[in-house]
Image: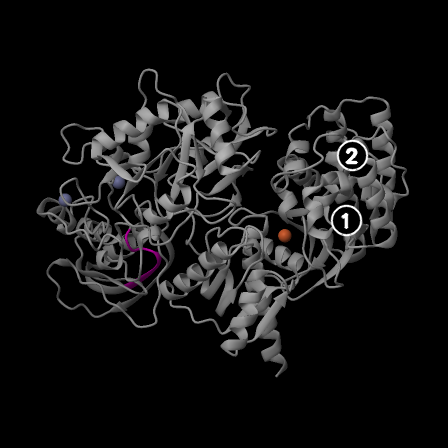
C-alpha cells in the first residue's frame, strides 16, 4: 500500500548535515519525495510503502546527525504525488520565520584524521572542516544559513571543494565553511607590525616562539587568545605583568586528554566534558604537579583546562620532542574589556602584550569566549556559557511572546524569547566599560536580527545604575514598550526553575546565595531564603544585614568586610586578628568612624561578603584582585575529614552569625589550622541552609528547593549541600544548562516578565 507524509522538523537542523541524512534515510526505506531547508526548519515530503513511513520518522529522531538538535517532529498524511526519486530542494526563505543556529563545533575525528594525513589535499590545513564540525555561530551573518550569509562569502570555492559541497554522499555536502589550501583562508605571523611568515612557515615560527617563552596572540574561533608555555614561570610572569592581571587564574590547553590527565585529576564526567564536541574549559582538581608554573592559577585548587578545538590549535600544539605539552590560553583583552576578535583590534590593543600575532583572514562576525564548566552529578555546571553552547536555545516550559531581558551587570548575558525558545546570549562580560557596552549592544542587535525577534516588552534588573538597566530603560522609552524590572534574586530563583523546565504554579524554596543584588527594600541582598515562583516571591529569611563599608569597594577589601561583621556582632577588634593586623591603625580608626556614623555603609545581607569576611578573619585573603578571590581561596582549603560546624542563631527572619564569629575567633586563639577553620565555616553555612529550609518547609509545606546565585559556584558547598538536603527529604534543583551566577539571570527575567504580562492581560 502506497502512502505519503509531509513532515516538519524543528530545532537545530541546518548546517549540521541534516538534509543528506534525510536523503540517505529515504533511500534506505525506498521512499521518494524531497527535503528542503526553510527559515523555519526542515520540511520533508515522502511517499512509498506505508509500512516504511513510521520507521522512517522514528529513525529521523534516533539516528539524527551528531550536531543536530531536534525540538519537534510534526507530520500529516497527504495524497501521494507520484514522485519517482528523492531530491534535495533549494532553501526557502519565509519572511519572519526563524530557526535556531548551531553553535561553533570543535574539529571532528574525520577532519582530524585528514589534517594529519599527508595524502589528503587538506593535509595540515588549519581551516579544515565539514558538516559535522567547524565554525557556525561565530561566522553567521544572517539566515537561512548559506555561505553568502557567512564571513566565508569572500572566498570562492575551487572546483575540488565545490565538488564535495555539491555531492549529497560527501561529508562536506553543503558544509558552508568548506575550504582548502587552494581556495580558503590562510594564516600568517606578524611581528612588530610586519608579516614575517605565511602558512606552514608561520606555524613553525609561532611554535618556535612559544617554545622560547614568548607570548603569542593567536586568532582562534571566537576571538584571540594570548598563549605562552604554561611550564615557563618567566613567560607566565611576563604575561601577568603585561596583562596587568595579578592573580586571576589562566586557562590552559593541552594537545590531548593524556596530557590533561597529567596535570589534573579528571573524574569520568569531567573527561567527558573535556572531550565533548563543545570543548569547554573544564574546572578540574589540580594534581600536585611537577612542572606547571604556580603562577597559572595561584591559590586555586582547580585548573581550567581545555583541549584543542580547531585544526589550528592541533597544529600549534602538536607534540614534539622538547616542545611544551601545556599552554596558557587566555582570552586576549585588556583590563576586562571584551575579547579582541578582529585583526586590527588585536594588533592595536595587544601590541604591548604579545611578542607576535598568529592571525588569519577568516573574519569572526560575532566574538565569543570559551565556555567554562565544572561537573556536578555527571552533568555540566556552568560558570560561563559561551562557545560551543550559545546560541543553542533553552527550551521554555511554555510558549512565550517576543521579549528581551537585559540581564545584570557582572558576567552579563541577555536573553530573547519567542515561542518555546529562550535565546540566552553567550557571555558578554562585566558591563562596566564602554567597550563591553558596545559589544553588548551589537550582540543584542545581532541576536534580534538572526532570530527575527522584535521585543514586545523589556525586562531588566531592579538596580537603576546597571548599564544593562540603562539600556533597557532607554530602549523601552524610545520604542514605547513596557519595562518590567525584576528583583535580582527573584530572577535567580526563576532562572533555576526555568533551567529545570519547571511548569508548576506551586511555590518553591529559593536558597539564593549571591554576592550582590538590589533588594525590594532598597538594601543590598545576597544571603536569601525566598519562597516563590515565576509570579512573585516572599523573603522568608536572610543573613542579618551588616554595613558594607565603602559600598561596592568593600568587595575588594575582605579585611574591612571582616571588621564590619565583627563590629555588627559586637565583637572587639583584637590586635591578633589577621584583618586587624592587615589594616593600619589609622585605617582602622577611619573605618570605625565610618561604621559608627554610617558613612557610605549600605546595609547588606550578602553571602558573598560573608565568605569574604571569613576568608579575611581566617587569614587567607585580606585584599582581592579579582571577583570572589577570597572565597575561592577559602574553598580551596576545605577538607573532607572535618565534619563539625560553628553555632549560629535564627532570630525572627534573620540568621545571626555572632556565635559563629565568636567560635571562629576561639579557634584562632587555639591556633587551629586555617584549613580546619575554613571547613568548619563551610559546614556552618551548610547547616544554616538545612535548618532554615526545614523551618520554611514546616511553615509552608514547600518541599522543592532551588539553588541559585554566584556563591553556588562553590563546589564544596554544592557537593555537600545537595545530598544533605535530599536526605532530609527535599527535592533539590540546581542549574545545569545556564550559569548559577549572573550569567543565567536573564533567563529568569524572561520568565518573570512573561508571567507578569500574562497576569496583567488577565486582569484587563
Ligand atoms: Zn569535520
Ligand atoms: Zn578549495
Ligand atoms: Fe546575582
Instruction: Determine the secondary structure under disc 2.
Output: helix
Asked whether the beta carbons under mark 1 and mark 2 sit within 8 Å of each other, the answer is: no
Query: In the picture, which quadrant includes the N terminus?
Result: bottom left
Looking at the image, tell me whether mark 1 or mark 2 is earlier in sequence order: 1
| Residue 87 on image: x %, y % | 15, 59
Give the quadrant of residue 50: bottom left
Task: Look at 26% across and 47% down and name the residue there.
Answer: 362
What's the colour scheme? one colour
Q: Is residue 250 visible?
A: no
Tell me the crowding category of disc 2: few under 14, some 14 to 19, or many 20 or more residues within 10 angstroms, Cα based.
Answer: many
Closer to the camera, 435 or 391? 435
Q: Is residue 479 visible?
A: yes
The region drawn magenta spans: 7-15
Query: In the picture, which quadrant includes the C terminus?
Result: bottom right
Mark 1 near ligand 3 (CB under 8 Å)?
A: no
Assign ligand 2 to one image quadrant: top left
Q: Is residue 275 left or right of residue 112?
A: right
Task: Look at 84% across and 54% down and name the residue there.
Answer: 598
Task: Look at 38% across and 68% down and name the residue there.
Answer: 452
Q: Which residue is mark 1?
A: 549
Image: 128 above or below 16: above
Q: Which residue is mark 2?
A: 579
| Residue 615 on image: x %, y % | 73, 35
Closer to the camera, 678 or 38? 678
Q: Is residue 606 left or right of residue 740?
A: right
Give the quadrant of residue 537: bottom right
Report the disc number at residue 97. Answer: none
Taking the magenta stretch, the answer to whether it contains residue 13 is yes
Image: 581 above or below 590: above
Instruction: Determine the secondary structure under disc 1.
Output: loop
What secondary structure is the magenta-colored segment mainly? strand
Amino acid at each position: 500500500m502506497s502512502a505519503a507524509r509531509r513532515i516538519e522538523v524543528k530545532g537545530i537542523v541546518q548546517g549540521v548535515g541534516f538534509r543528506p541524512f534525510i536523503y540517505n534515510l529515504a533511500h534506505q526505506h525506498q521512499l521518494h519525495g524531497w527535503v528542503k531547508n526553510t527559515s523555519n526548519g526542515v520540511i520533508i515530503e515522502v511517499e512509498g510503502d506505508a509500512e516504511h513511513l513510521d520507521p522512517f520518522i522514528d529513525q529521523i529522531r534516533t539516528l539524527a546527525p551528531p550536531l543536530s538538535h531536534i525540538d519537534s517532529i510534526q507530520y500529516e498524511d497527504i495524497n501521494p504525488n507520484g514522485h519517482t526519486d528523492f531530491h534535495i530542494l533549494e532553501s526557502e526563505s519565509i519572511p519572519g520565520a526563524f530557526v535556531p543556529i548551531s553553535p561553533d563545533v570543535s574539529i571532528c575525528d574525520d577532519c582530524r584524521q585528514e589534517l594529519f594525513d599527508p595524502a589528503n589535499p587538506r593535509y595540515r590545513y588549519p581551516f579544515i572542516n565539514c558538516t559535522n564540525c567547524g565554525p557556525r555561530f561565530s561566522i553567521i551573518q544572517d539566515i537561512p544559513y548559506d555561505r553568502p550569509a557567512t564571513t566565508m562569502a569572500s572566498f570562492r570555492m575551487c572546483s575540488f571543494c565545490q565538488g564535495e559541497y555539491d555531492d549529497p554522499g560527501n561529508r562536506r555536502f553543503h558544509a558552508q565553511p568548506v575550504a582548502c589550501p587552494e581556495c580558503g583562508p590562510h594564516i600568517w605571523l606578524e611581528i612588530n607590525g610586519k608579516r614575517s611568515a605565511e602558512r606552514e612557515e608561520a606555524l613553525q615560527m609561532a611554535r618556535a616562539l612559544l617554545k622560547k617563552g614568548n607570548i603569542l596572540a593567536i586568532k582562534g574561533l571566537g576571538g584571540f587568545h594570548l598563549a605562552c608555555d604554561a611550564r615557563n614561570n618567566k613567560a607566565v610572569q611576563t604575561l601577568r605583568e603585561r596583562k596587568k592581571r595579578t592573580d586571576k587564574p589562566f586557562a590552559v590547553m593541552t594537545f590531548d586528554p593524556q596530557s590533561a590527565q597529567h596535570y589534573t585529576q579528571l573524574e569520568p564526567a569531567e573527561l567527558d566534558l573535556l572531550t565533548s564536541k563543545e570543548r569547554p574549559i573544564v574546572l578540574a582538581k589540580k594534581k600536585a604537579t611537577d612542572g606547571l608554573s604556580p603562577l597559572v592559577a595561584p591559590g586555586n585548587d582547580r585548573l581550567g583546562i581545555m583541549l584543542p578545538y580547531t585544526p589550528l590549535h592541533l597544529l600549534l600544539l602538536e607534540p614534539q620532542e622538547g616542545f611544551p605539552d601545556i599552554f596558557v590560553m587566555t582570552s586576549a583583552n585588556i583590563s576586562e574589556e571584551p575579547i579582541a576578535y578582529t585583526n586590527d583590534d588585536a594588533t592595536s590593543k595587544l601590541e604591548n602584550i604579545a611578542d607576535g600575532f598568529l592571525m588569519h583572514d577568516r573574519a569572526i562576525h560575532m566574538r565569543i569566549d570559551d565556555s567554562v564548566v565544572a561537573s556536578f552529578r555527571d552533568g555540566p555546571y556552568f560558570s560561563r556559557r559561551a562557545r560551543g553552547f550559545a546560541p543553542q536555545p533553552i527550551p521554555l516550559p511554555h510558549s512565550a511572546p517576543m521579549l528581551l531581558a537585559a540581564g545584570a551587570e557582572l558576567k552579563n548575558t541577555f536573553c530573547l524569547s519567542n515561542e518555546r525558545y529562550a535565546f540566552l546570549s553567550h557571555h558578554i562580560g562585566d558591563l562596566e566599560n564602554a567597550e563591553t557596552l558596545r559589544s553588548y549592544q551589537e550582540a543584542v542587535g545581532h541576536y534580534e536580527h538572526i532570530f527575527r525577534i522584535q521585543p514586545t516588552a523589556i525586562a531588566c534588573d531592579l538596580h537603576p545604575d546597571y548599564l544593562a538597566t540603562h539600556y533597557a530603560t532607554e530602549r523601552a522609552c524610545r520604542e514605547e514598550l513596557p519595562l518590567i524590572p525584576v528583583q535580582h534574586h527573584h530572577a535567580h530563583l526563576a532562572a533555576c526553575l526555568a533551567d529545570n523546565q519547571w511548569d508548576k504554579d506551586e511555590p518553591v524554596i529559593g536558597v539564593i546565595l549571591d554576592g550582590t543584588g538590589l533588594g525590594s527594600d532598597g538594601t543590598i541582598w545576597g544571603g536569601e531564603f525566598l519562597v516563590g515562583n515565576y509570579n512573585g516571591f516572599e523573603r522568608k529569611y536572610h543573613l542579618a544585614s551588616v554595613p558594607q563599608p565603602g559600598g561596592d569597594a568593600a568587595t575588594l577589601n575582605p579585611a574591612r568586610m571582616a571588621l564590619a561583621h565583627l563590629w555588627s556582632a559586637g565583637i572587639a577588634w583584637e590586635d591578633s586578628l589577621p584583618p586587624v593586623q592587615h589594616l593600619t591603625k589609622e585605617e582602622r580608626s577611619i573605618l570605625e568612624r565610618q561604621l559608627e556614623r554610617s558613612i557610605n555603609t549600605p546595609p547588606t545581607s550578602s553571602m558573598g561578603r560573608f565568605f569574604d569576611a571569613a576568608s579575611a578573619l581566617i587569614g587567607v585573603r585580606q585584599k582581592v584582585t579579582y571577583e570572589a578571590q577570597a572565597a575561592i581561596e577559602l574553598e580551596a582549603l576545605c577538607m573532607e575529614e572535618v565534619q563539625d560546624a560553628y553555632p549560629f542563631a535564627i532570630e525572627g527572619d534573620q540568621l545571626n552569625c555572632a556565635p559563629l564569629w565568636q567560635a571562629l575567633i576561639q579557634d584562632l586563639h587555639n591556633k587551629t589550622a586555617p584549613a580546619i577553620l575554613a571547613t568548619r565555616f563551610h559546614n556552618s553555612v551548610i547547616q544554616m541552609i538545612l535548618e532554615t529550609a526545614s523551618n520554611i518547609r514546616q511553615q509552608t509545606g514547600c518541599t522543592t528547593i532551588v539553588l541559585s546565585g554566584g556563591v553556588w559556584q562553590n563546589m564544596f558547598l554544592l557537593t555537600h549541600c545537595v545530598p544533605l538536603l535530599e536526605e532530609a527529604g527535599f527535592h533539590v534543583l540546581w542549574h545545569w544548562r545556564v550559569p548559577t551566577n549572573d550569567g543565567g539571570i536573564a533567563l529568569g527575567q524572561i520568565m518573570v516578565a512573561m508571567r507578569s504580562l500574562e497576569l496583567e492581560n488577565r486582569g484587563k
